[in-house]
Image (spheres, coloured by chain):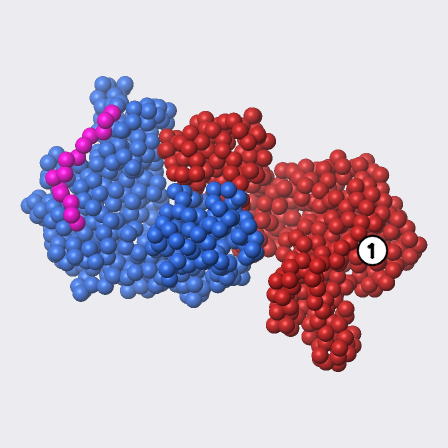
Chain colours: A blue, B red
Amino acid sequence: MRLKLHVLKVYTGRPVIFLHESSAKKIGIRTGDRVTIKKNGNSLVAIVDLVRDIIKKNEAALSEELNLALKGHNKGYIEIFPSEIAESSSILHDQFECNQYSQKDLEKIMGDIVNNLLTEAEIAYFISGMVHCKSSIKEIIYLINAMVKTGSRISWPYKIIADKHSIGGIAGNRTTPIVVSICASAGVIMPKTSSRAITSAAGTADTVESIAPVSLSVSQLKKVVNKTGACLVWGGSLGLAPADDKLIRVEKLLRVDPESQLLASILAKKVSVGSTHVLIDIPYGEGAKVSKVQGEKLGQLFILLGKKLNLKIKVVLTDGKEPIGHGVGPILEIKDVIKVLKQDNSPKDLENKSLFLAGNILELVGKVKKGYGIIKAREILYSGQAYKKFCEIVHAQGGDPKTWLPEAKFNHTIISKYNGIIKKIDNKDINYLARITGCPVDKTAGVYLYKHIGEYIQKGEKIVTLFSESNQKLKEAVKFFKKNKSIVIK
Amino acid sequence: MRLKLHVLKVYTGRPVIFLHESSAKKIGIRTGDRVTIKKNGNSLVAIVDLVRDIIKKNEAALSEELNLALKGHNKGYIEIFPSEIAESSSILHDQFECNQYSQKDLEKIMGDIVNNLLTEAEIAYFISGMVHCKSSIKEIIYLINAMVKTGSRISWPYKIIADKHSIGGIAGNRTTPIVVSICASAGVIMPKTSSRAITSAAGTADTVESIAPVSLSVSQLKKVVNKTGACLVWGGSLGLAPADDKLIRVEKLLRVDPESQLLASILAKKVSVGSTHVLIDIPYGEGAKVSKVQGEKLGQLFILLGKKLNLKIKVVLTDGKEPIGHGVGPILEIKDVIKVLKQDNSPKDLENKSLFLAGNILELVGKVKKGYGIIKAREILYSGQAYKKFCEIVHAQGGDPKTWLPEAKFNHTIISKYNGIIKKIDNKDINYLARITGCPVDKTAGVYLYKHIGEYIQKGEKIVTLFSESNQKLKEAVKFFKKNKSIVIK
């Protein structure tokens, strides 16, 4: 059926087409059905909402986003057809009592997820299966292969491609720019892609973005890496394992994080970007995502999967009981990073963790003998080479390491009312606090921590400063802090 | 936040509120978040779609349906608040590796489903768990209790309340009006509620609706039953186990039908309507929903659950290999029903099955001795009492048994090209064929079958007549019939 295109400024979080009731009736389509939309040789699948106003009878309305995906102008006509039921939809509903999926099944499902052929409800249905049914190693490998196969894959003329990944959860844990700069200085190739914050205050991509563009294309990324040996970009614009991004979106809605999919998600991205050697950082402890025992178990799974995927994986378990560095929030964190790189009032906990991780990578790729990694890393950092490399990378991405980093319009400092020892700094609370102040959207927003666990604090000394672009948000953050005892002094 | 209400003629299949981007930003809400909407002391939860056109900055748009649910006028203001995360949402995401739910968990989940607090994706997530993890009898009982508790429950001053249920799947299987009329004639109280067609050509409610109103309130239903001893109404307007209706809607989207939920769905409705004695009809065989072995297993589960619920359940397995009666479609089926009741050219297969079921109910409630049920049922039918009772019920519901039943505008008869025996009549195909002709929306549409399996047919004799209000639909139906060999003659 041919209908006049009407583009709406609507954000529905799922691909929706608004059809007039009368045209839907003609082709036997109901609310919630899927239709294939064709325009200029491009096509995609959307879910139908029926309307009797907003549009005329001979029109169909799409969101700007969907129209963009069709690569269409805002005018003209579209063709719509009732969608056949997605092949993977049948695979899903034929699956019961925790049967395992085959390689072919998972390729179909991931392919249909990428092409919008499965609804949010069907994706949730798939995820629920992953949570309730223990995946075998074989099934996770199938899932990884399927995610890689249904996205772009970058190939390199280099033999060794290094990478790192932290499973996250620790506020202010911004080691990546430091580790990449150190390793690249030593000649290690590191095409590092990072995520933006999903539930945390800032992702590495949000942080680096305050001084350099991070939304690069694959060819731009290759240019930067070929020039400097590394990059610090956002993974979301590269089309690496795109099924994973869509799964994560639904998992976020459901607030679940199945282990098999966590493993597949990380490793599919690494395989897609062409990595050969990967260091996995698993912070553990109270307030971290995992306990020590869980972390060890997870680490073993990573190594097992790495062997099957021909990836050399090293896992390190690190102390995750408190935030790292002083700043939590995009600009506050990049300031900490630069302090370490320039060795100018460097936050020692962030420096030490970065040296530890960089040292491990240098050993993993064979740049130094076992036991000499940290020494080499420290040498590179202290000599100023790492900072120089960092500036090179930022320049190559089109940024400027000397970008002026503004301070938020409003701030509020909280003072200790007692003498005592810092007993606890709750990671989740600090992240949430930073979100209240406006992170990650407001780059200047966030939390500055003056002390860490075990340090002595005197009555009248500063505990934290909260930064925000909105006085209202600042007040809410102060209220949250006071109510939740996110930092315990005894 | 207070916003001006704007009502849209939109059908989204899920509760959606359109908020202007600028107001959403002010209270920190994003696409896909849930908000609580309050108006005149009523409140409900909806999912946010963001817009930059359609509405003004100080407005929020609701669908007519949602506005109706708020019992509001089309004008005035609404208050919106970011929704707390539903308690049951946490129950869902704390559940993994096929743990069983507790009574309390399921009550929370069913309650939140009824109150729109769970999204479609979360409901799909719950259903997937039911499909992948085998429910214990205990868990199914918990589910039934939870469904009953979160809806209305009808109580009666009578000691015995009889009911019947067929698990469905058989085209034309319209025994209910006949069975209810016979049993009520014998003094059995039968407040029968039925469903509308979901995937079939017609439900009992659609069929009866062609001569009587079926959307009664609980108090109207009670009046009809107190007067006539029975009723033939639609279950959907009574608020009995409403969580079940919402689960079924999502299951339909996913095209799954988990056994535990099938059992819970049927029995929760029976408990809610106040039944004490229930006959379950399980048609089995090729083209039916279950095989004989599956049917027997299902029957045992029904009886086991009945014992725990204090329901007296009898299960009968019936031959489900072909359609029953001549007509498939609302009016064609009510014509068959009246032919049986008036003993005027009665389709014998429909008559015999109805007598068998009615006889079983008479025995189950103790109206006759074991072995005498069918005899008594036949006596009542042949004496004309059943037809008289049927007319009473139709009158009491506000209908007229003498309603003129029109024929569809277009019809097409298919003639046999060979001499032979009818070897197969595919239930699913016949149902689908009737849907193509316009069932259940067009009450006159459908399929009329002249012969049944095993009957001899001569070249030139009629096989079926297809009825439709649209010549286009009729042509499609003929095409489908010819292509699919839905009836095999050999």
Horizontally, residue A336 falls left or right of residue B178, namely left
Horizontally, residue B347 falls left or right of residue A355, namely right
- Quadrant including the C terminus of chain B: bottom right
Few, some or many residues within 10 Å of mark 1 (<14, 14–19, 20+): some
- The picture places residue B345, in percent across and down from the top left corner, at 86, 63
Q: Which of A421 and B75 is in front in this view?
A: B75
Number of marks present in the image shown: 1
Q: Main secondary structure of the magenta part?
A: loop
Chain under disc 1: B
Residue at x 14%, y 38% (from the top left corner): A403
Vertical comparison of A313 with B119: above or below: below
For the record, the magenta segment spans A397-411
Q: Is A409 inside the magenta-drawn segment?
A: yes
Q: Is B253 inside the magenta-drawn segment?
A: no
Horizontally, residue A301 falls left or right of residue A224, namely right
Q: What's under tag 1, amino acid-wise?
A: Ile
**What residue is pinned by disc 1?**
B338
Q: Nearer the viewer, residue A314 or B120?
A: B120
SS of the residue under disc 1: helix
Residue at x 38%, y 36% (from the top left corner): B21
Residue at x 26%, y 58% (from the top left corner): A273
The reply to whether residue B339 is visible in this rendering is: yes
- The picture places residue A260, in percent across and down from the top left corner, at 40, 54
Residue at x 68%, y 50% (from the top left corner): B196
- The picture places residue A84, in percent across and down from the top left corner, at 50, 61
- The picture places residue B323, in percent across and down from the top left corner, at 73, 64
Q: Which of B344 and B285 is in front in this view?
A: B344
- Quadrant including the N terminus of chain B: top left
Horizontally, residue B151 falls left or right of residue A140, namely right
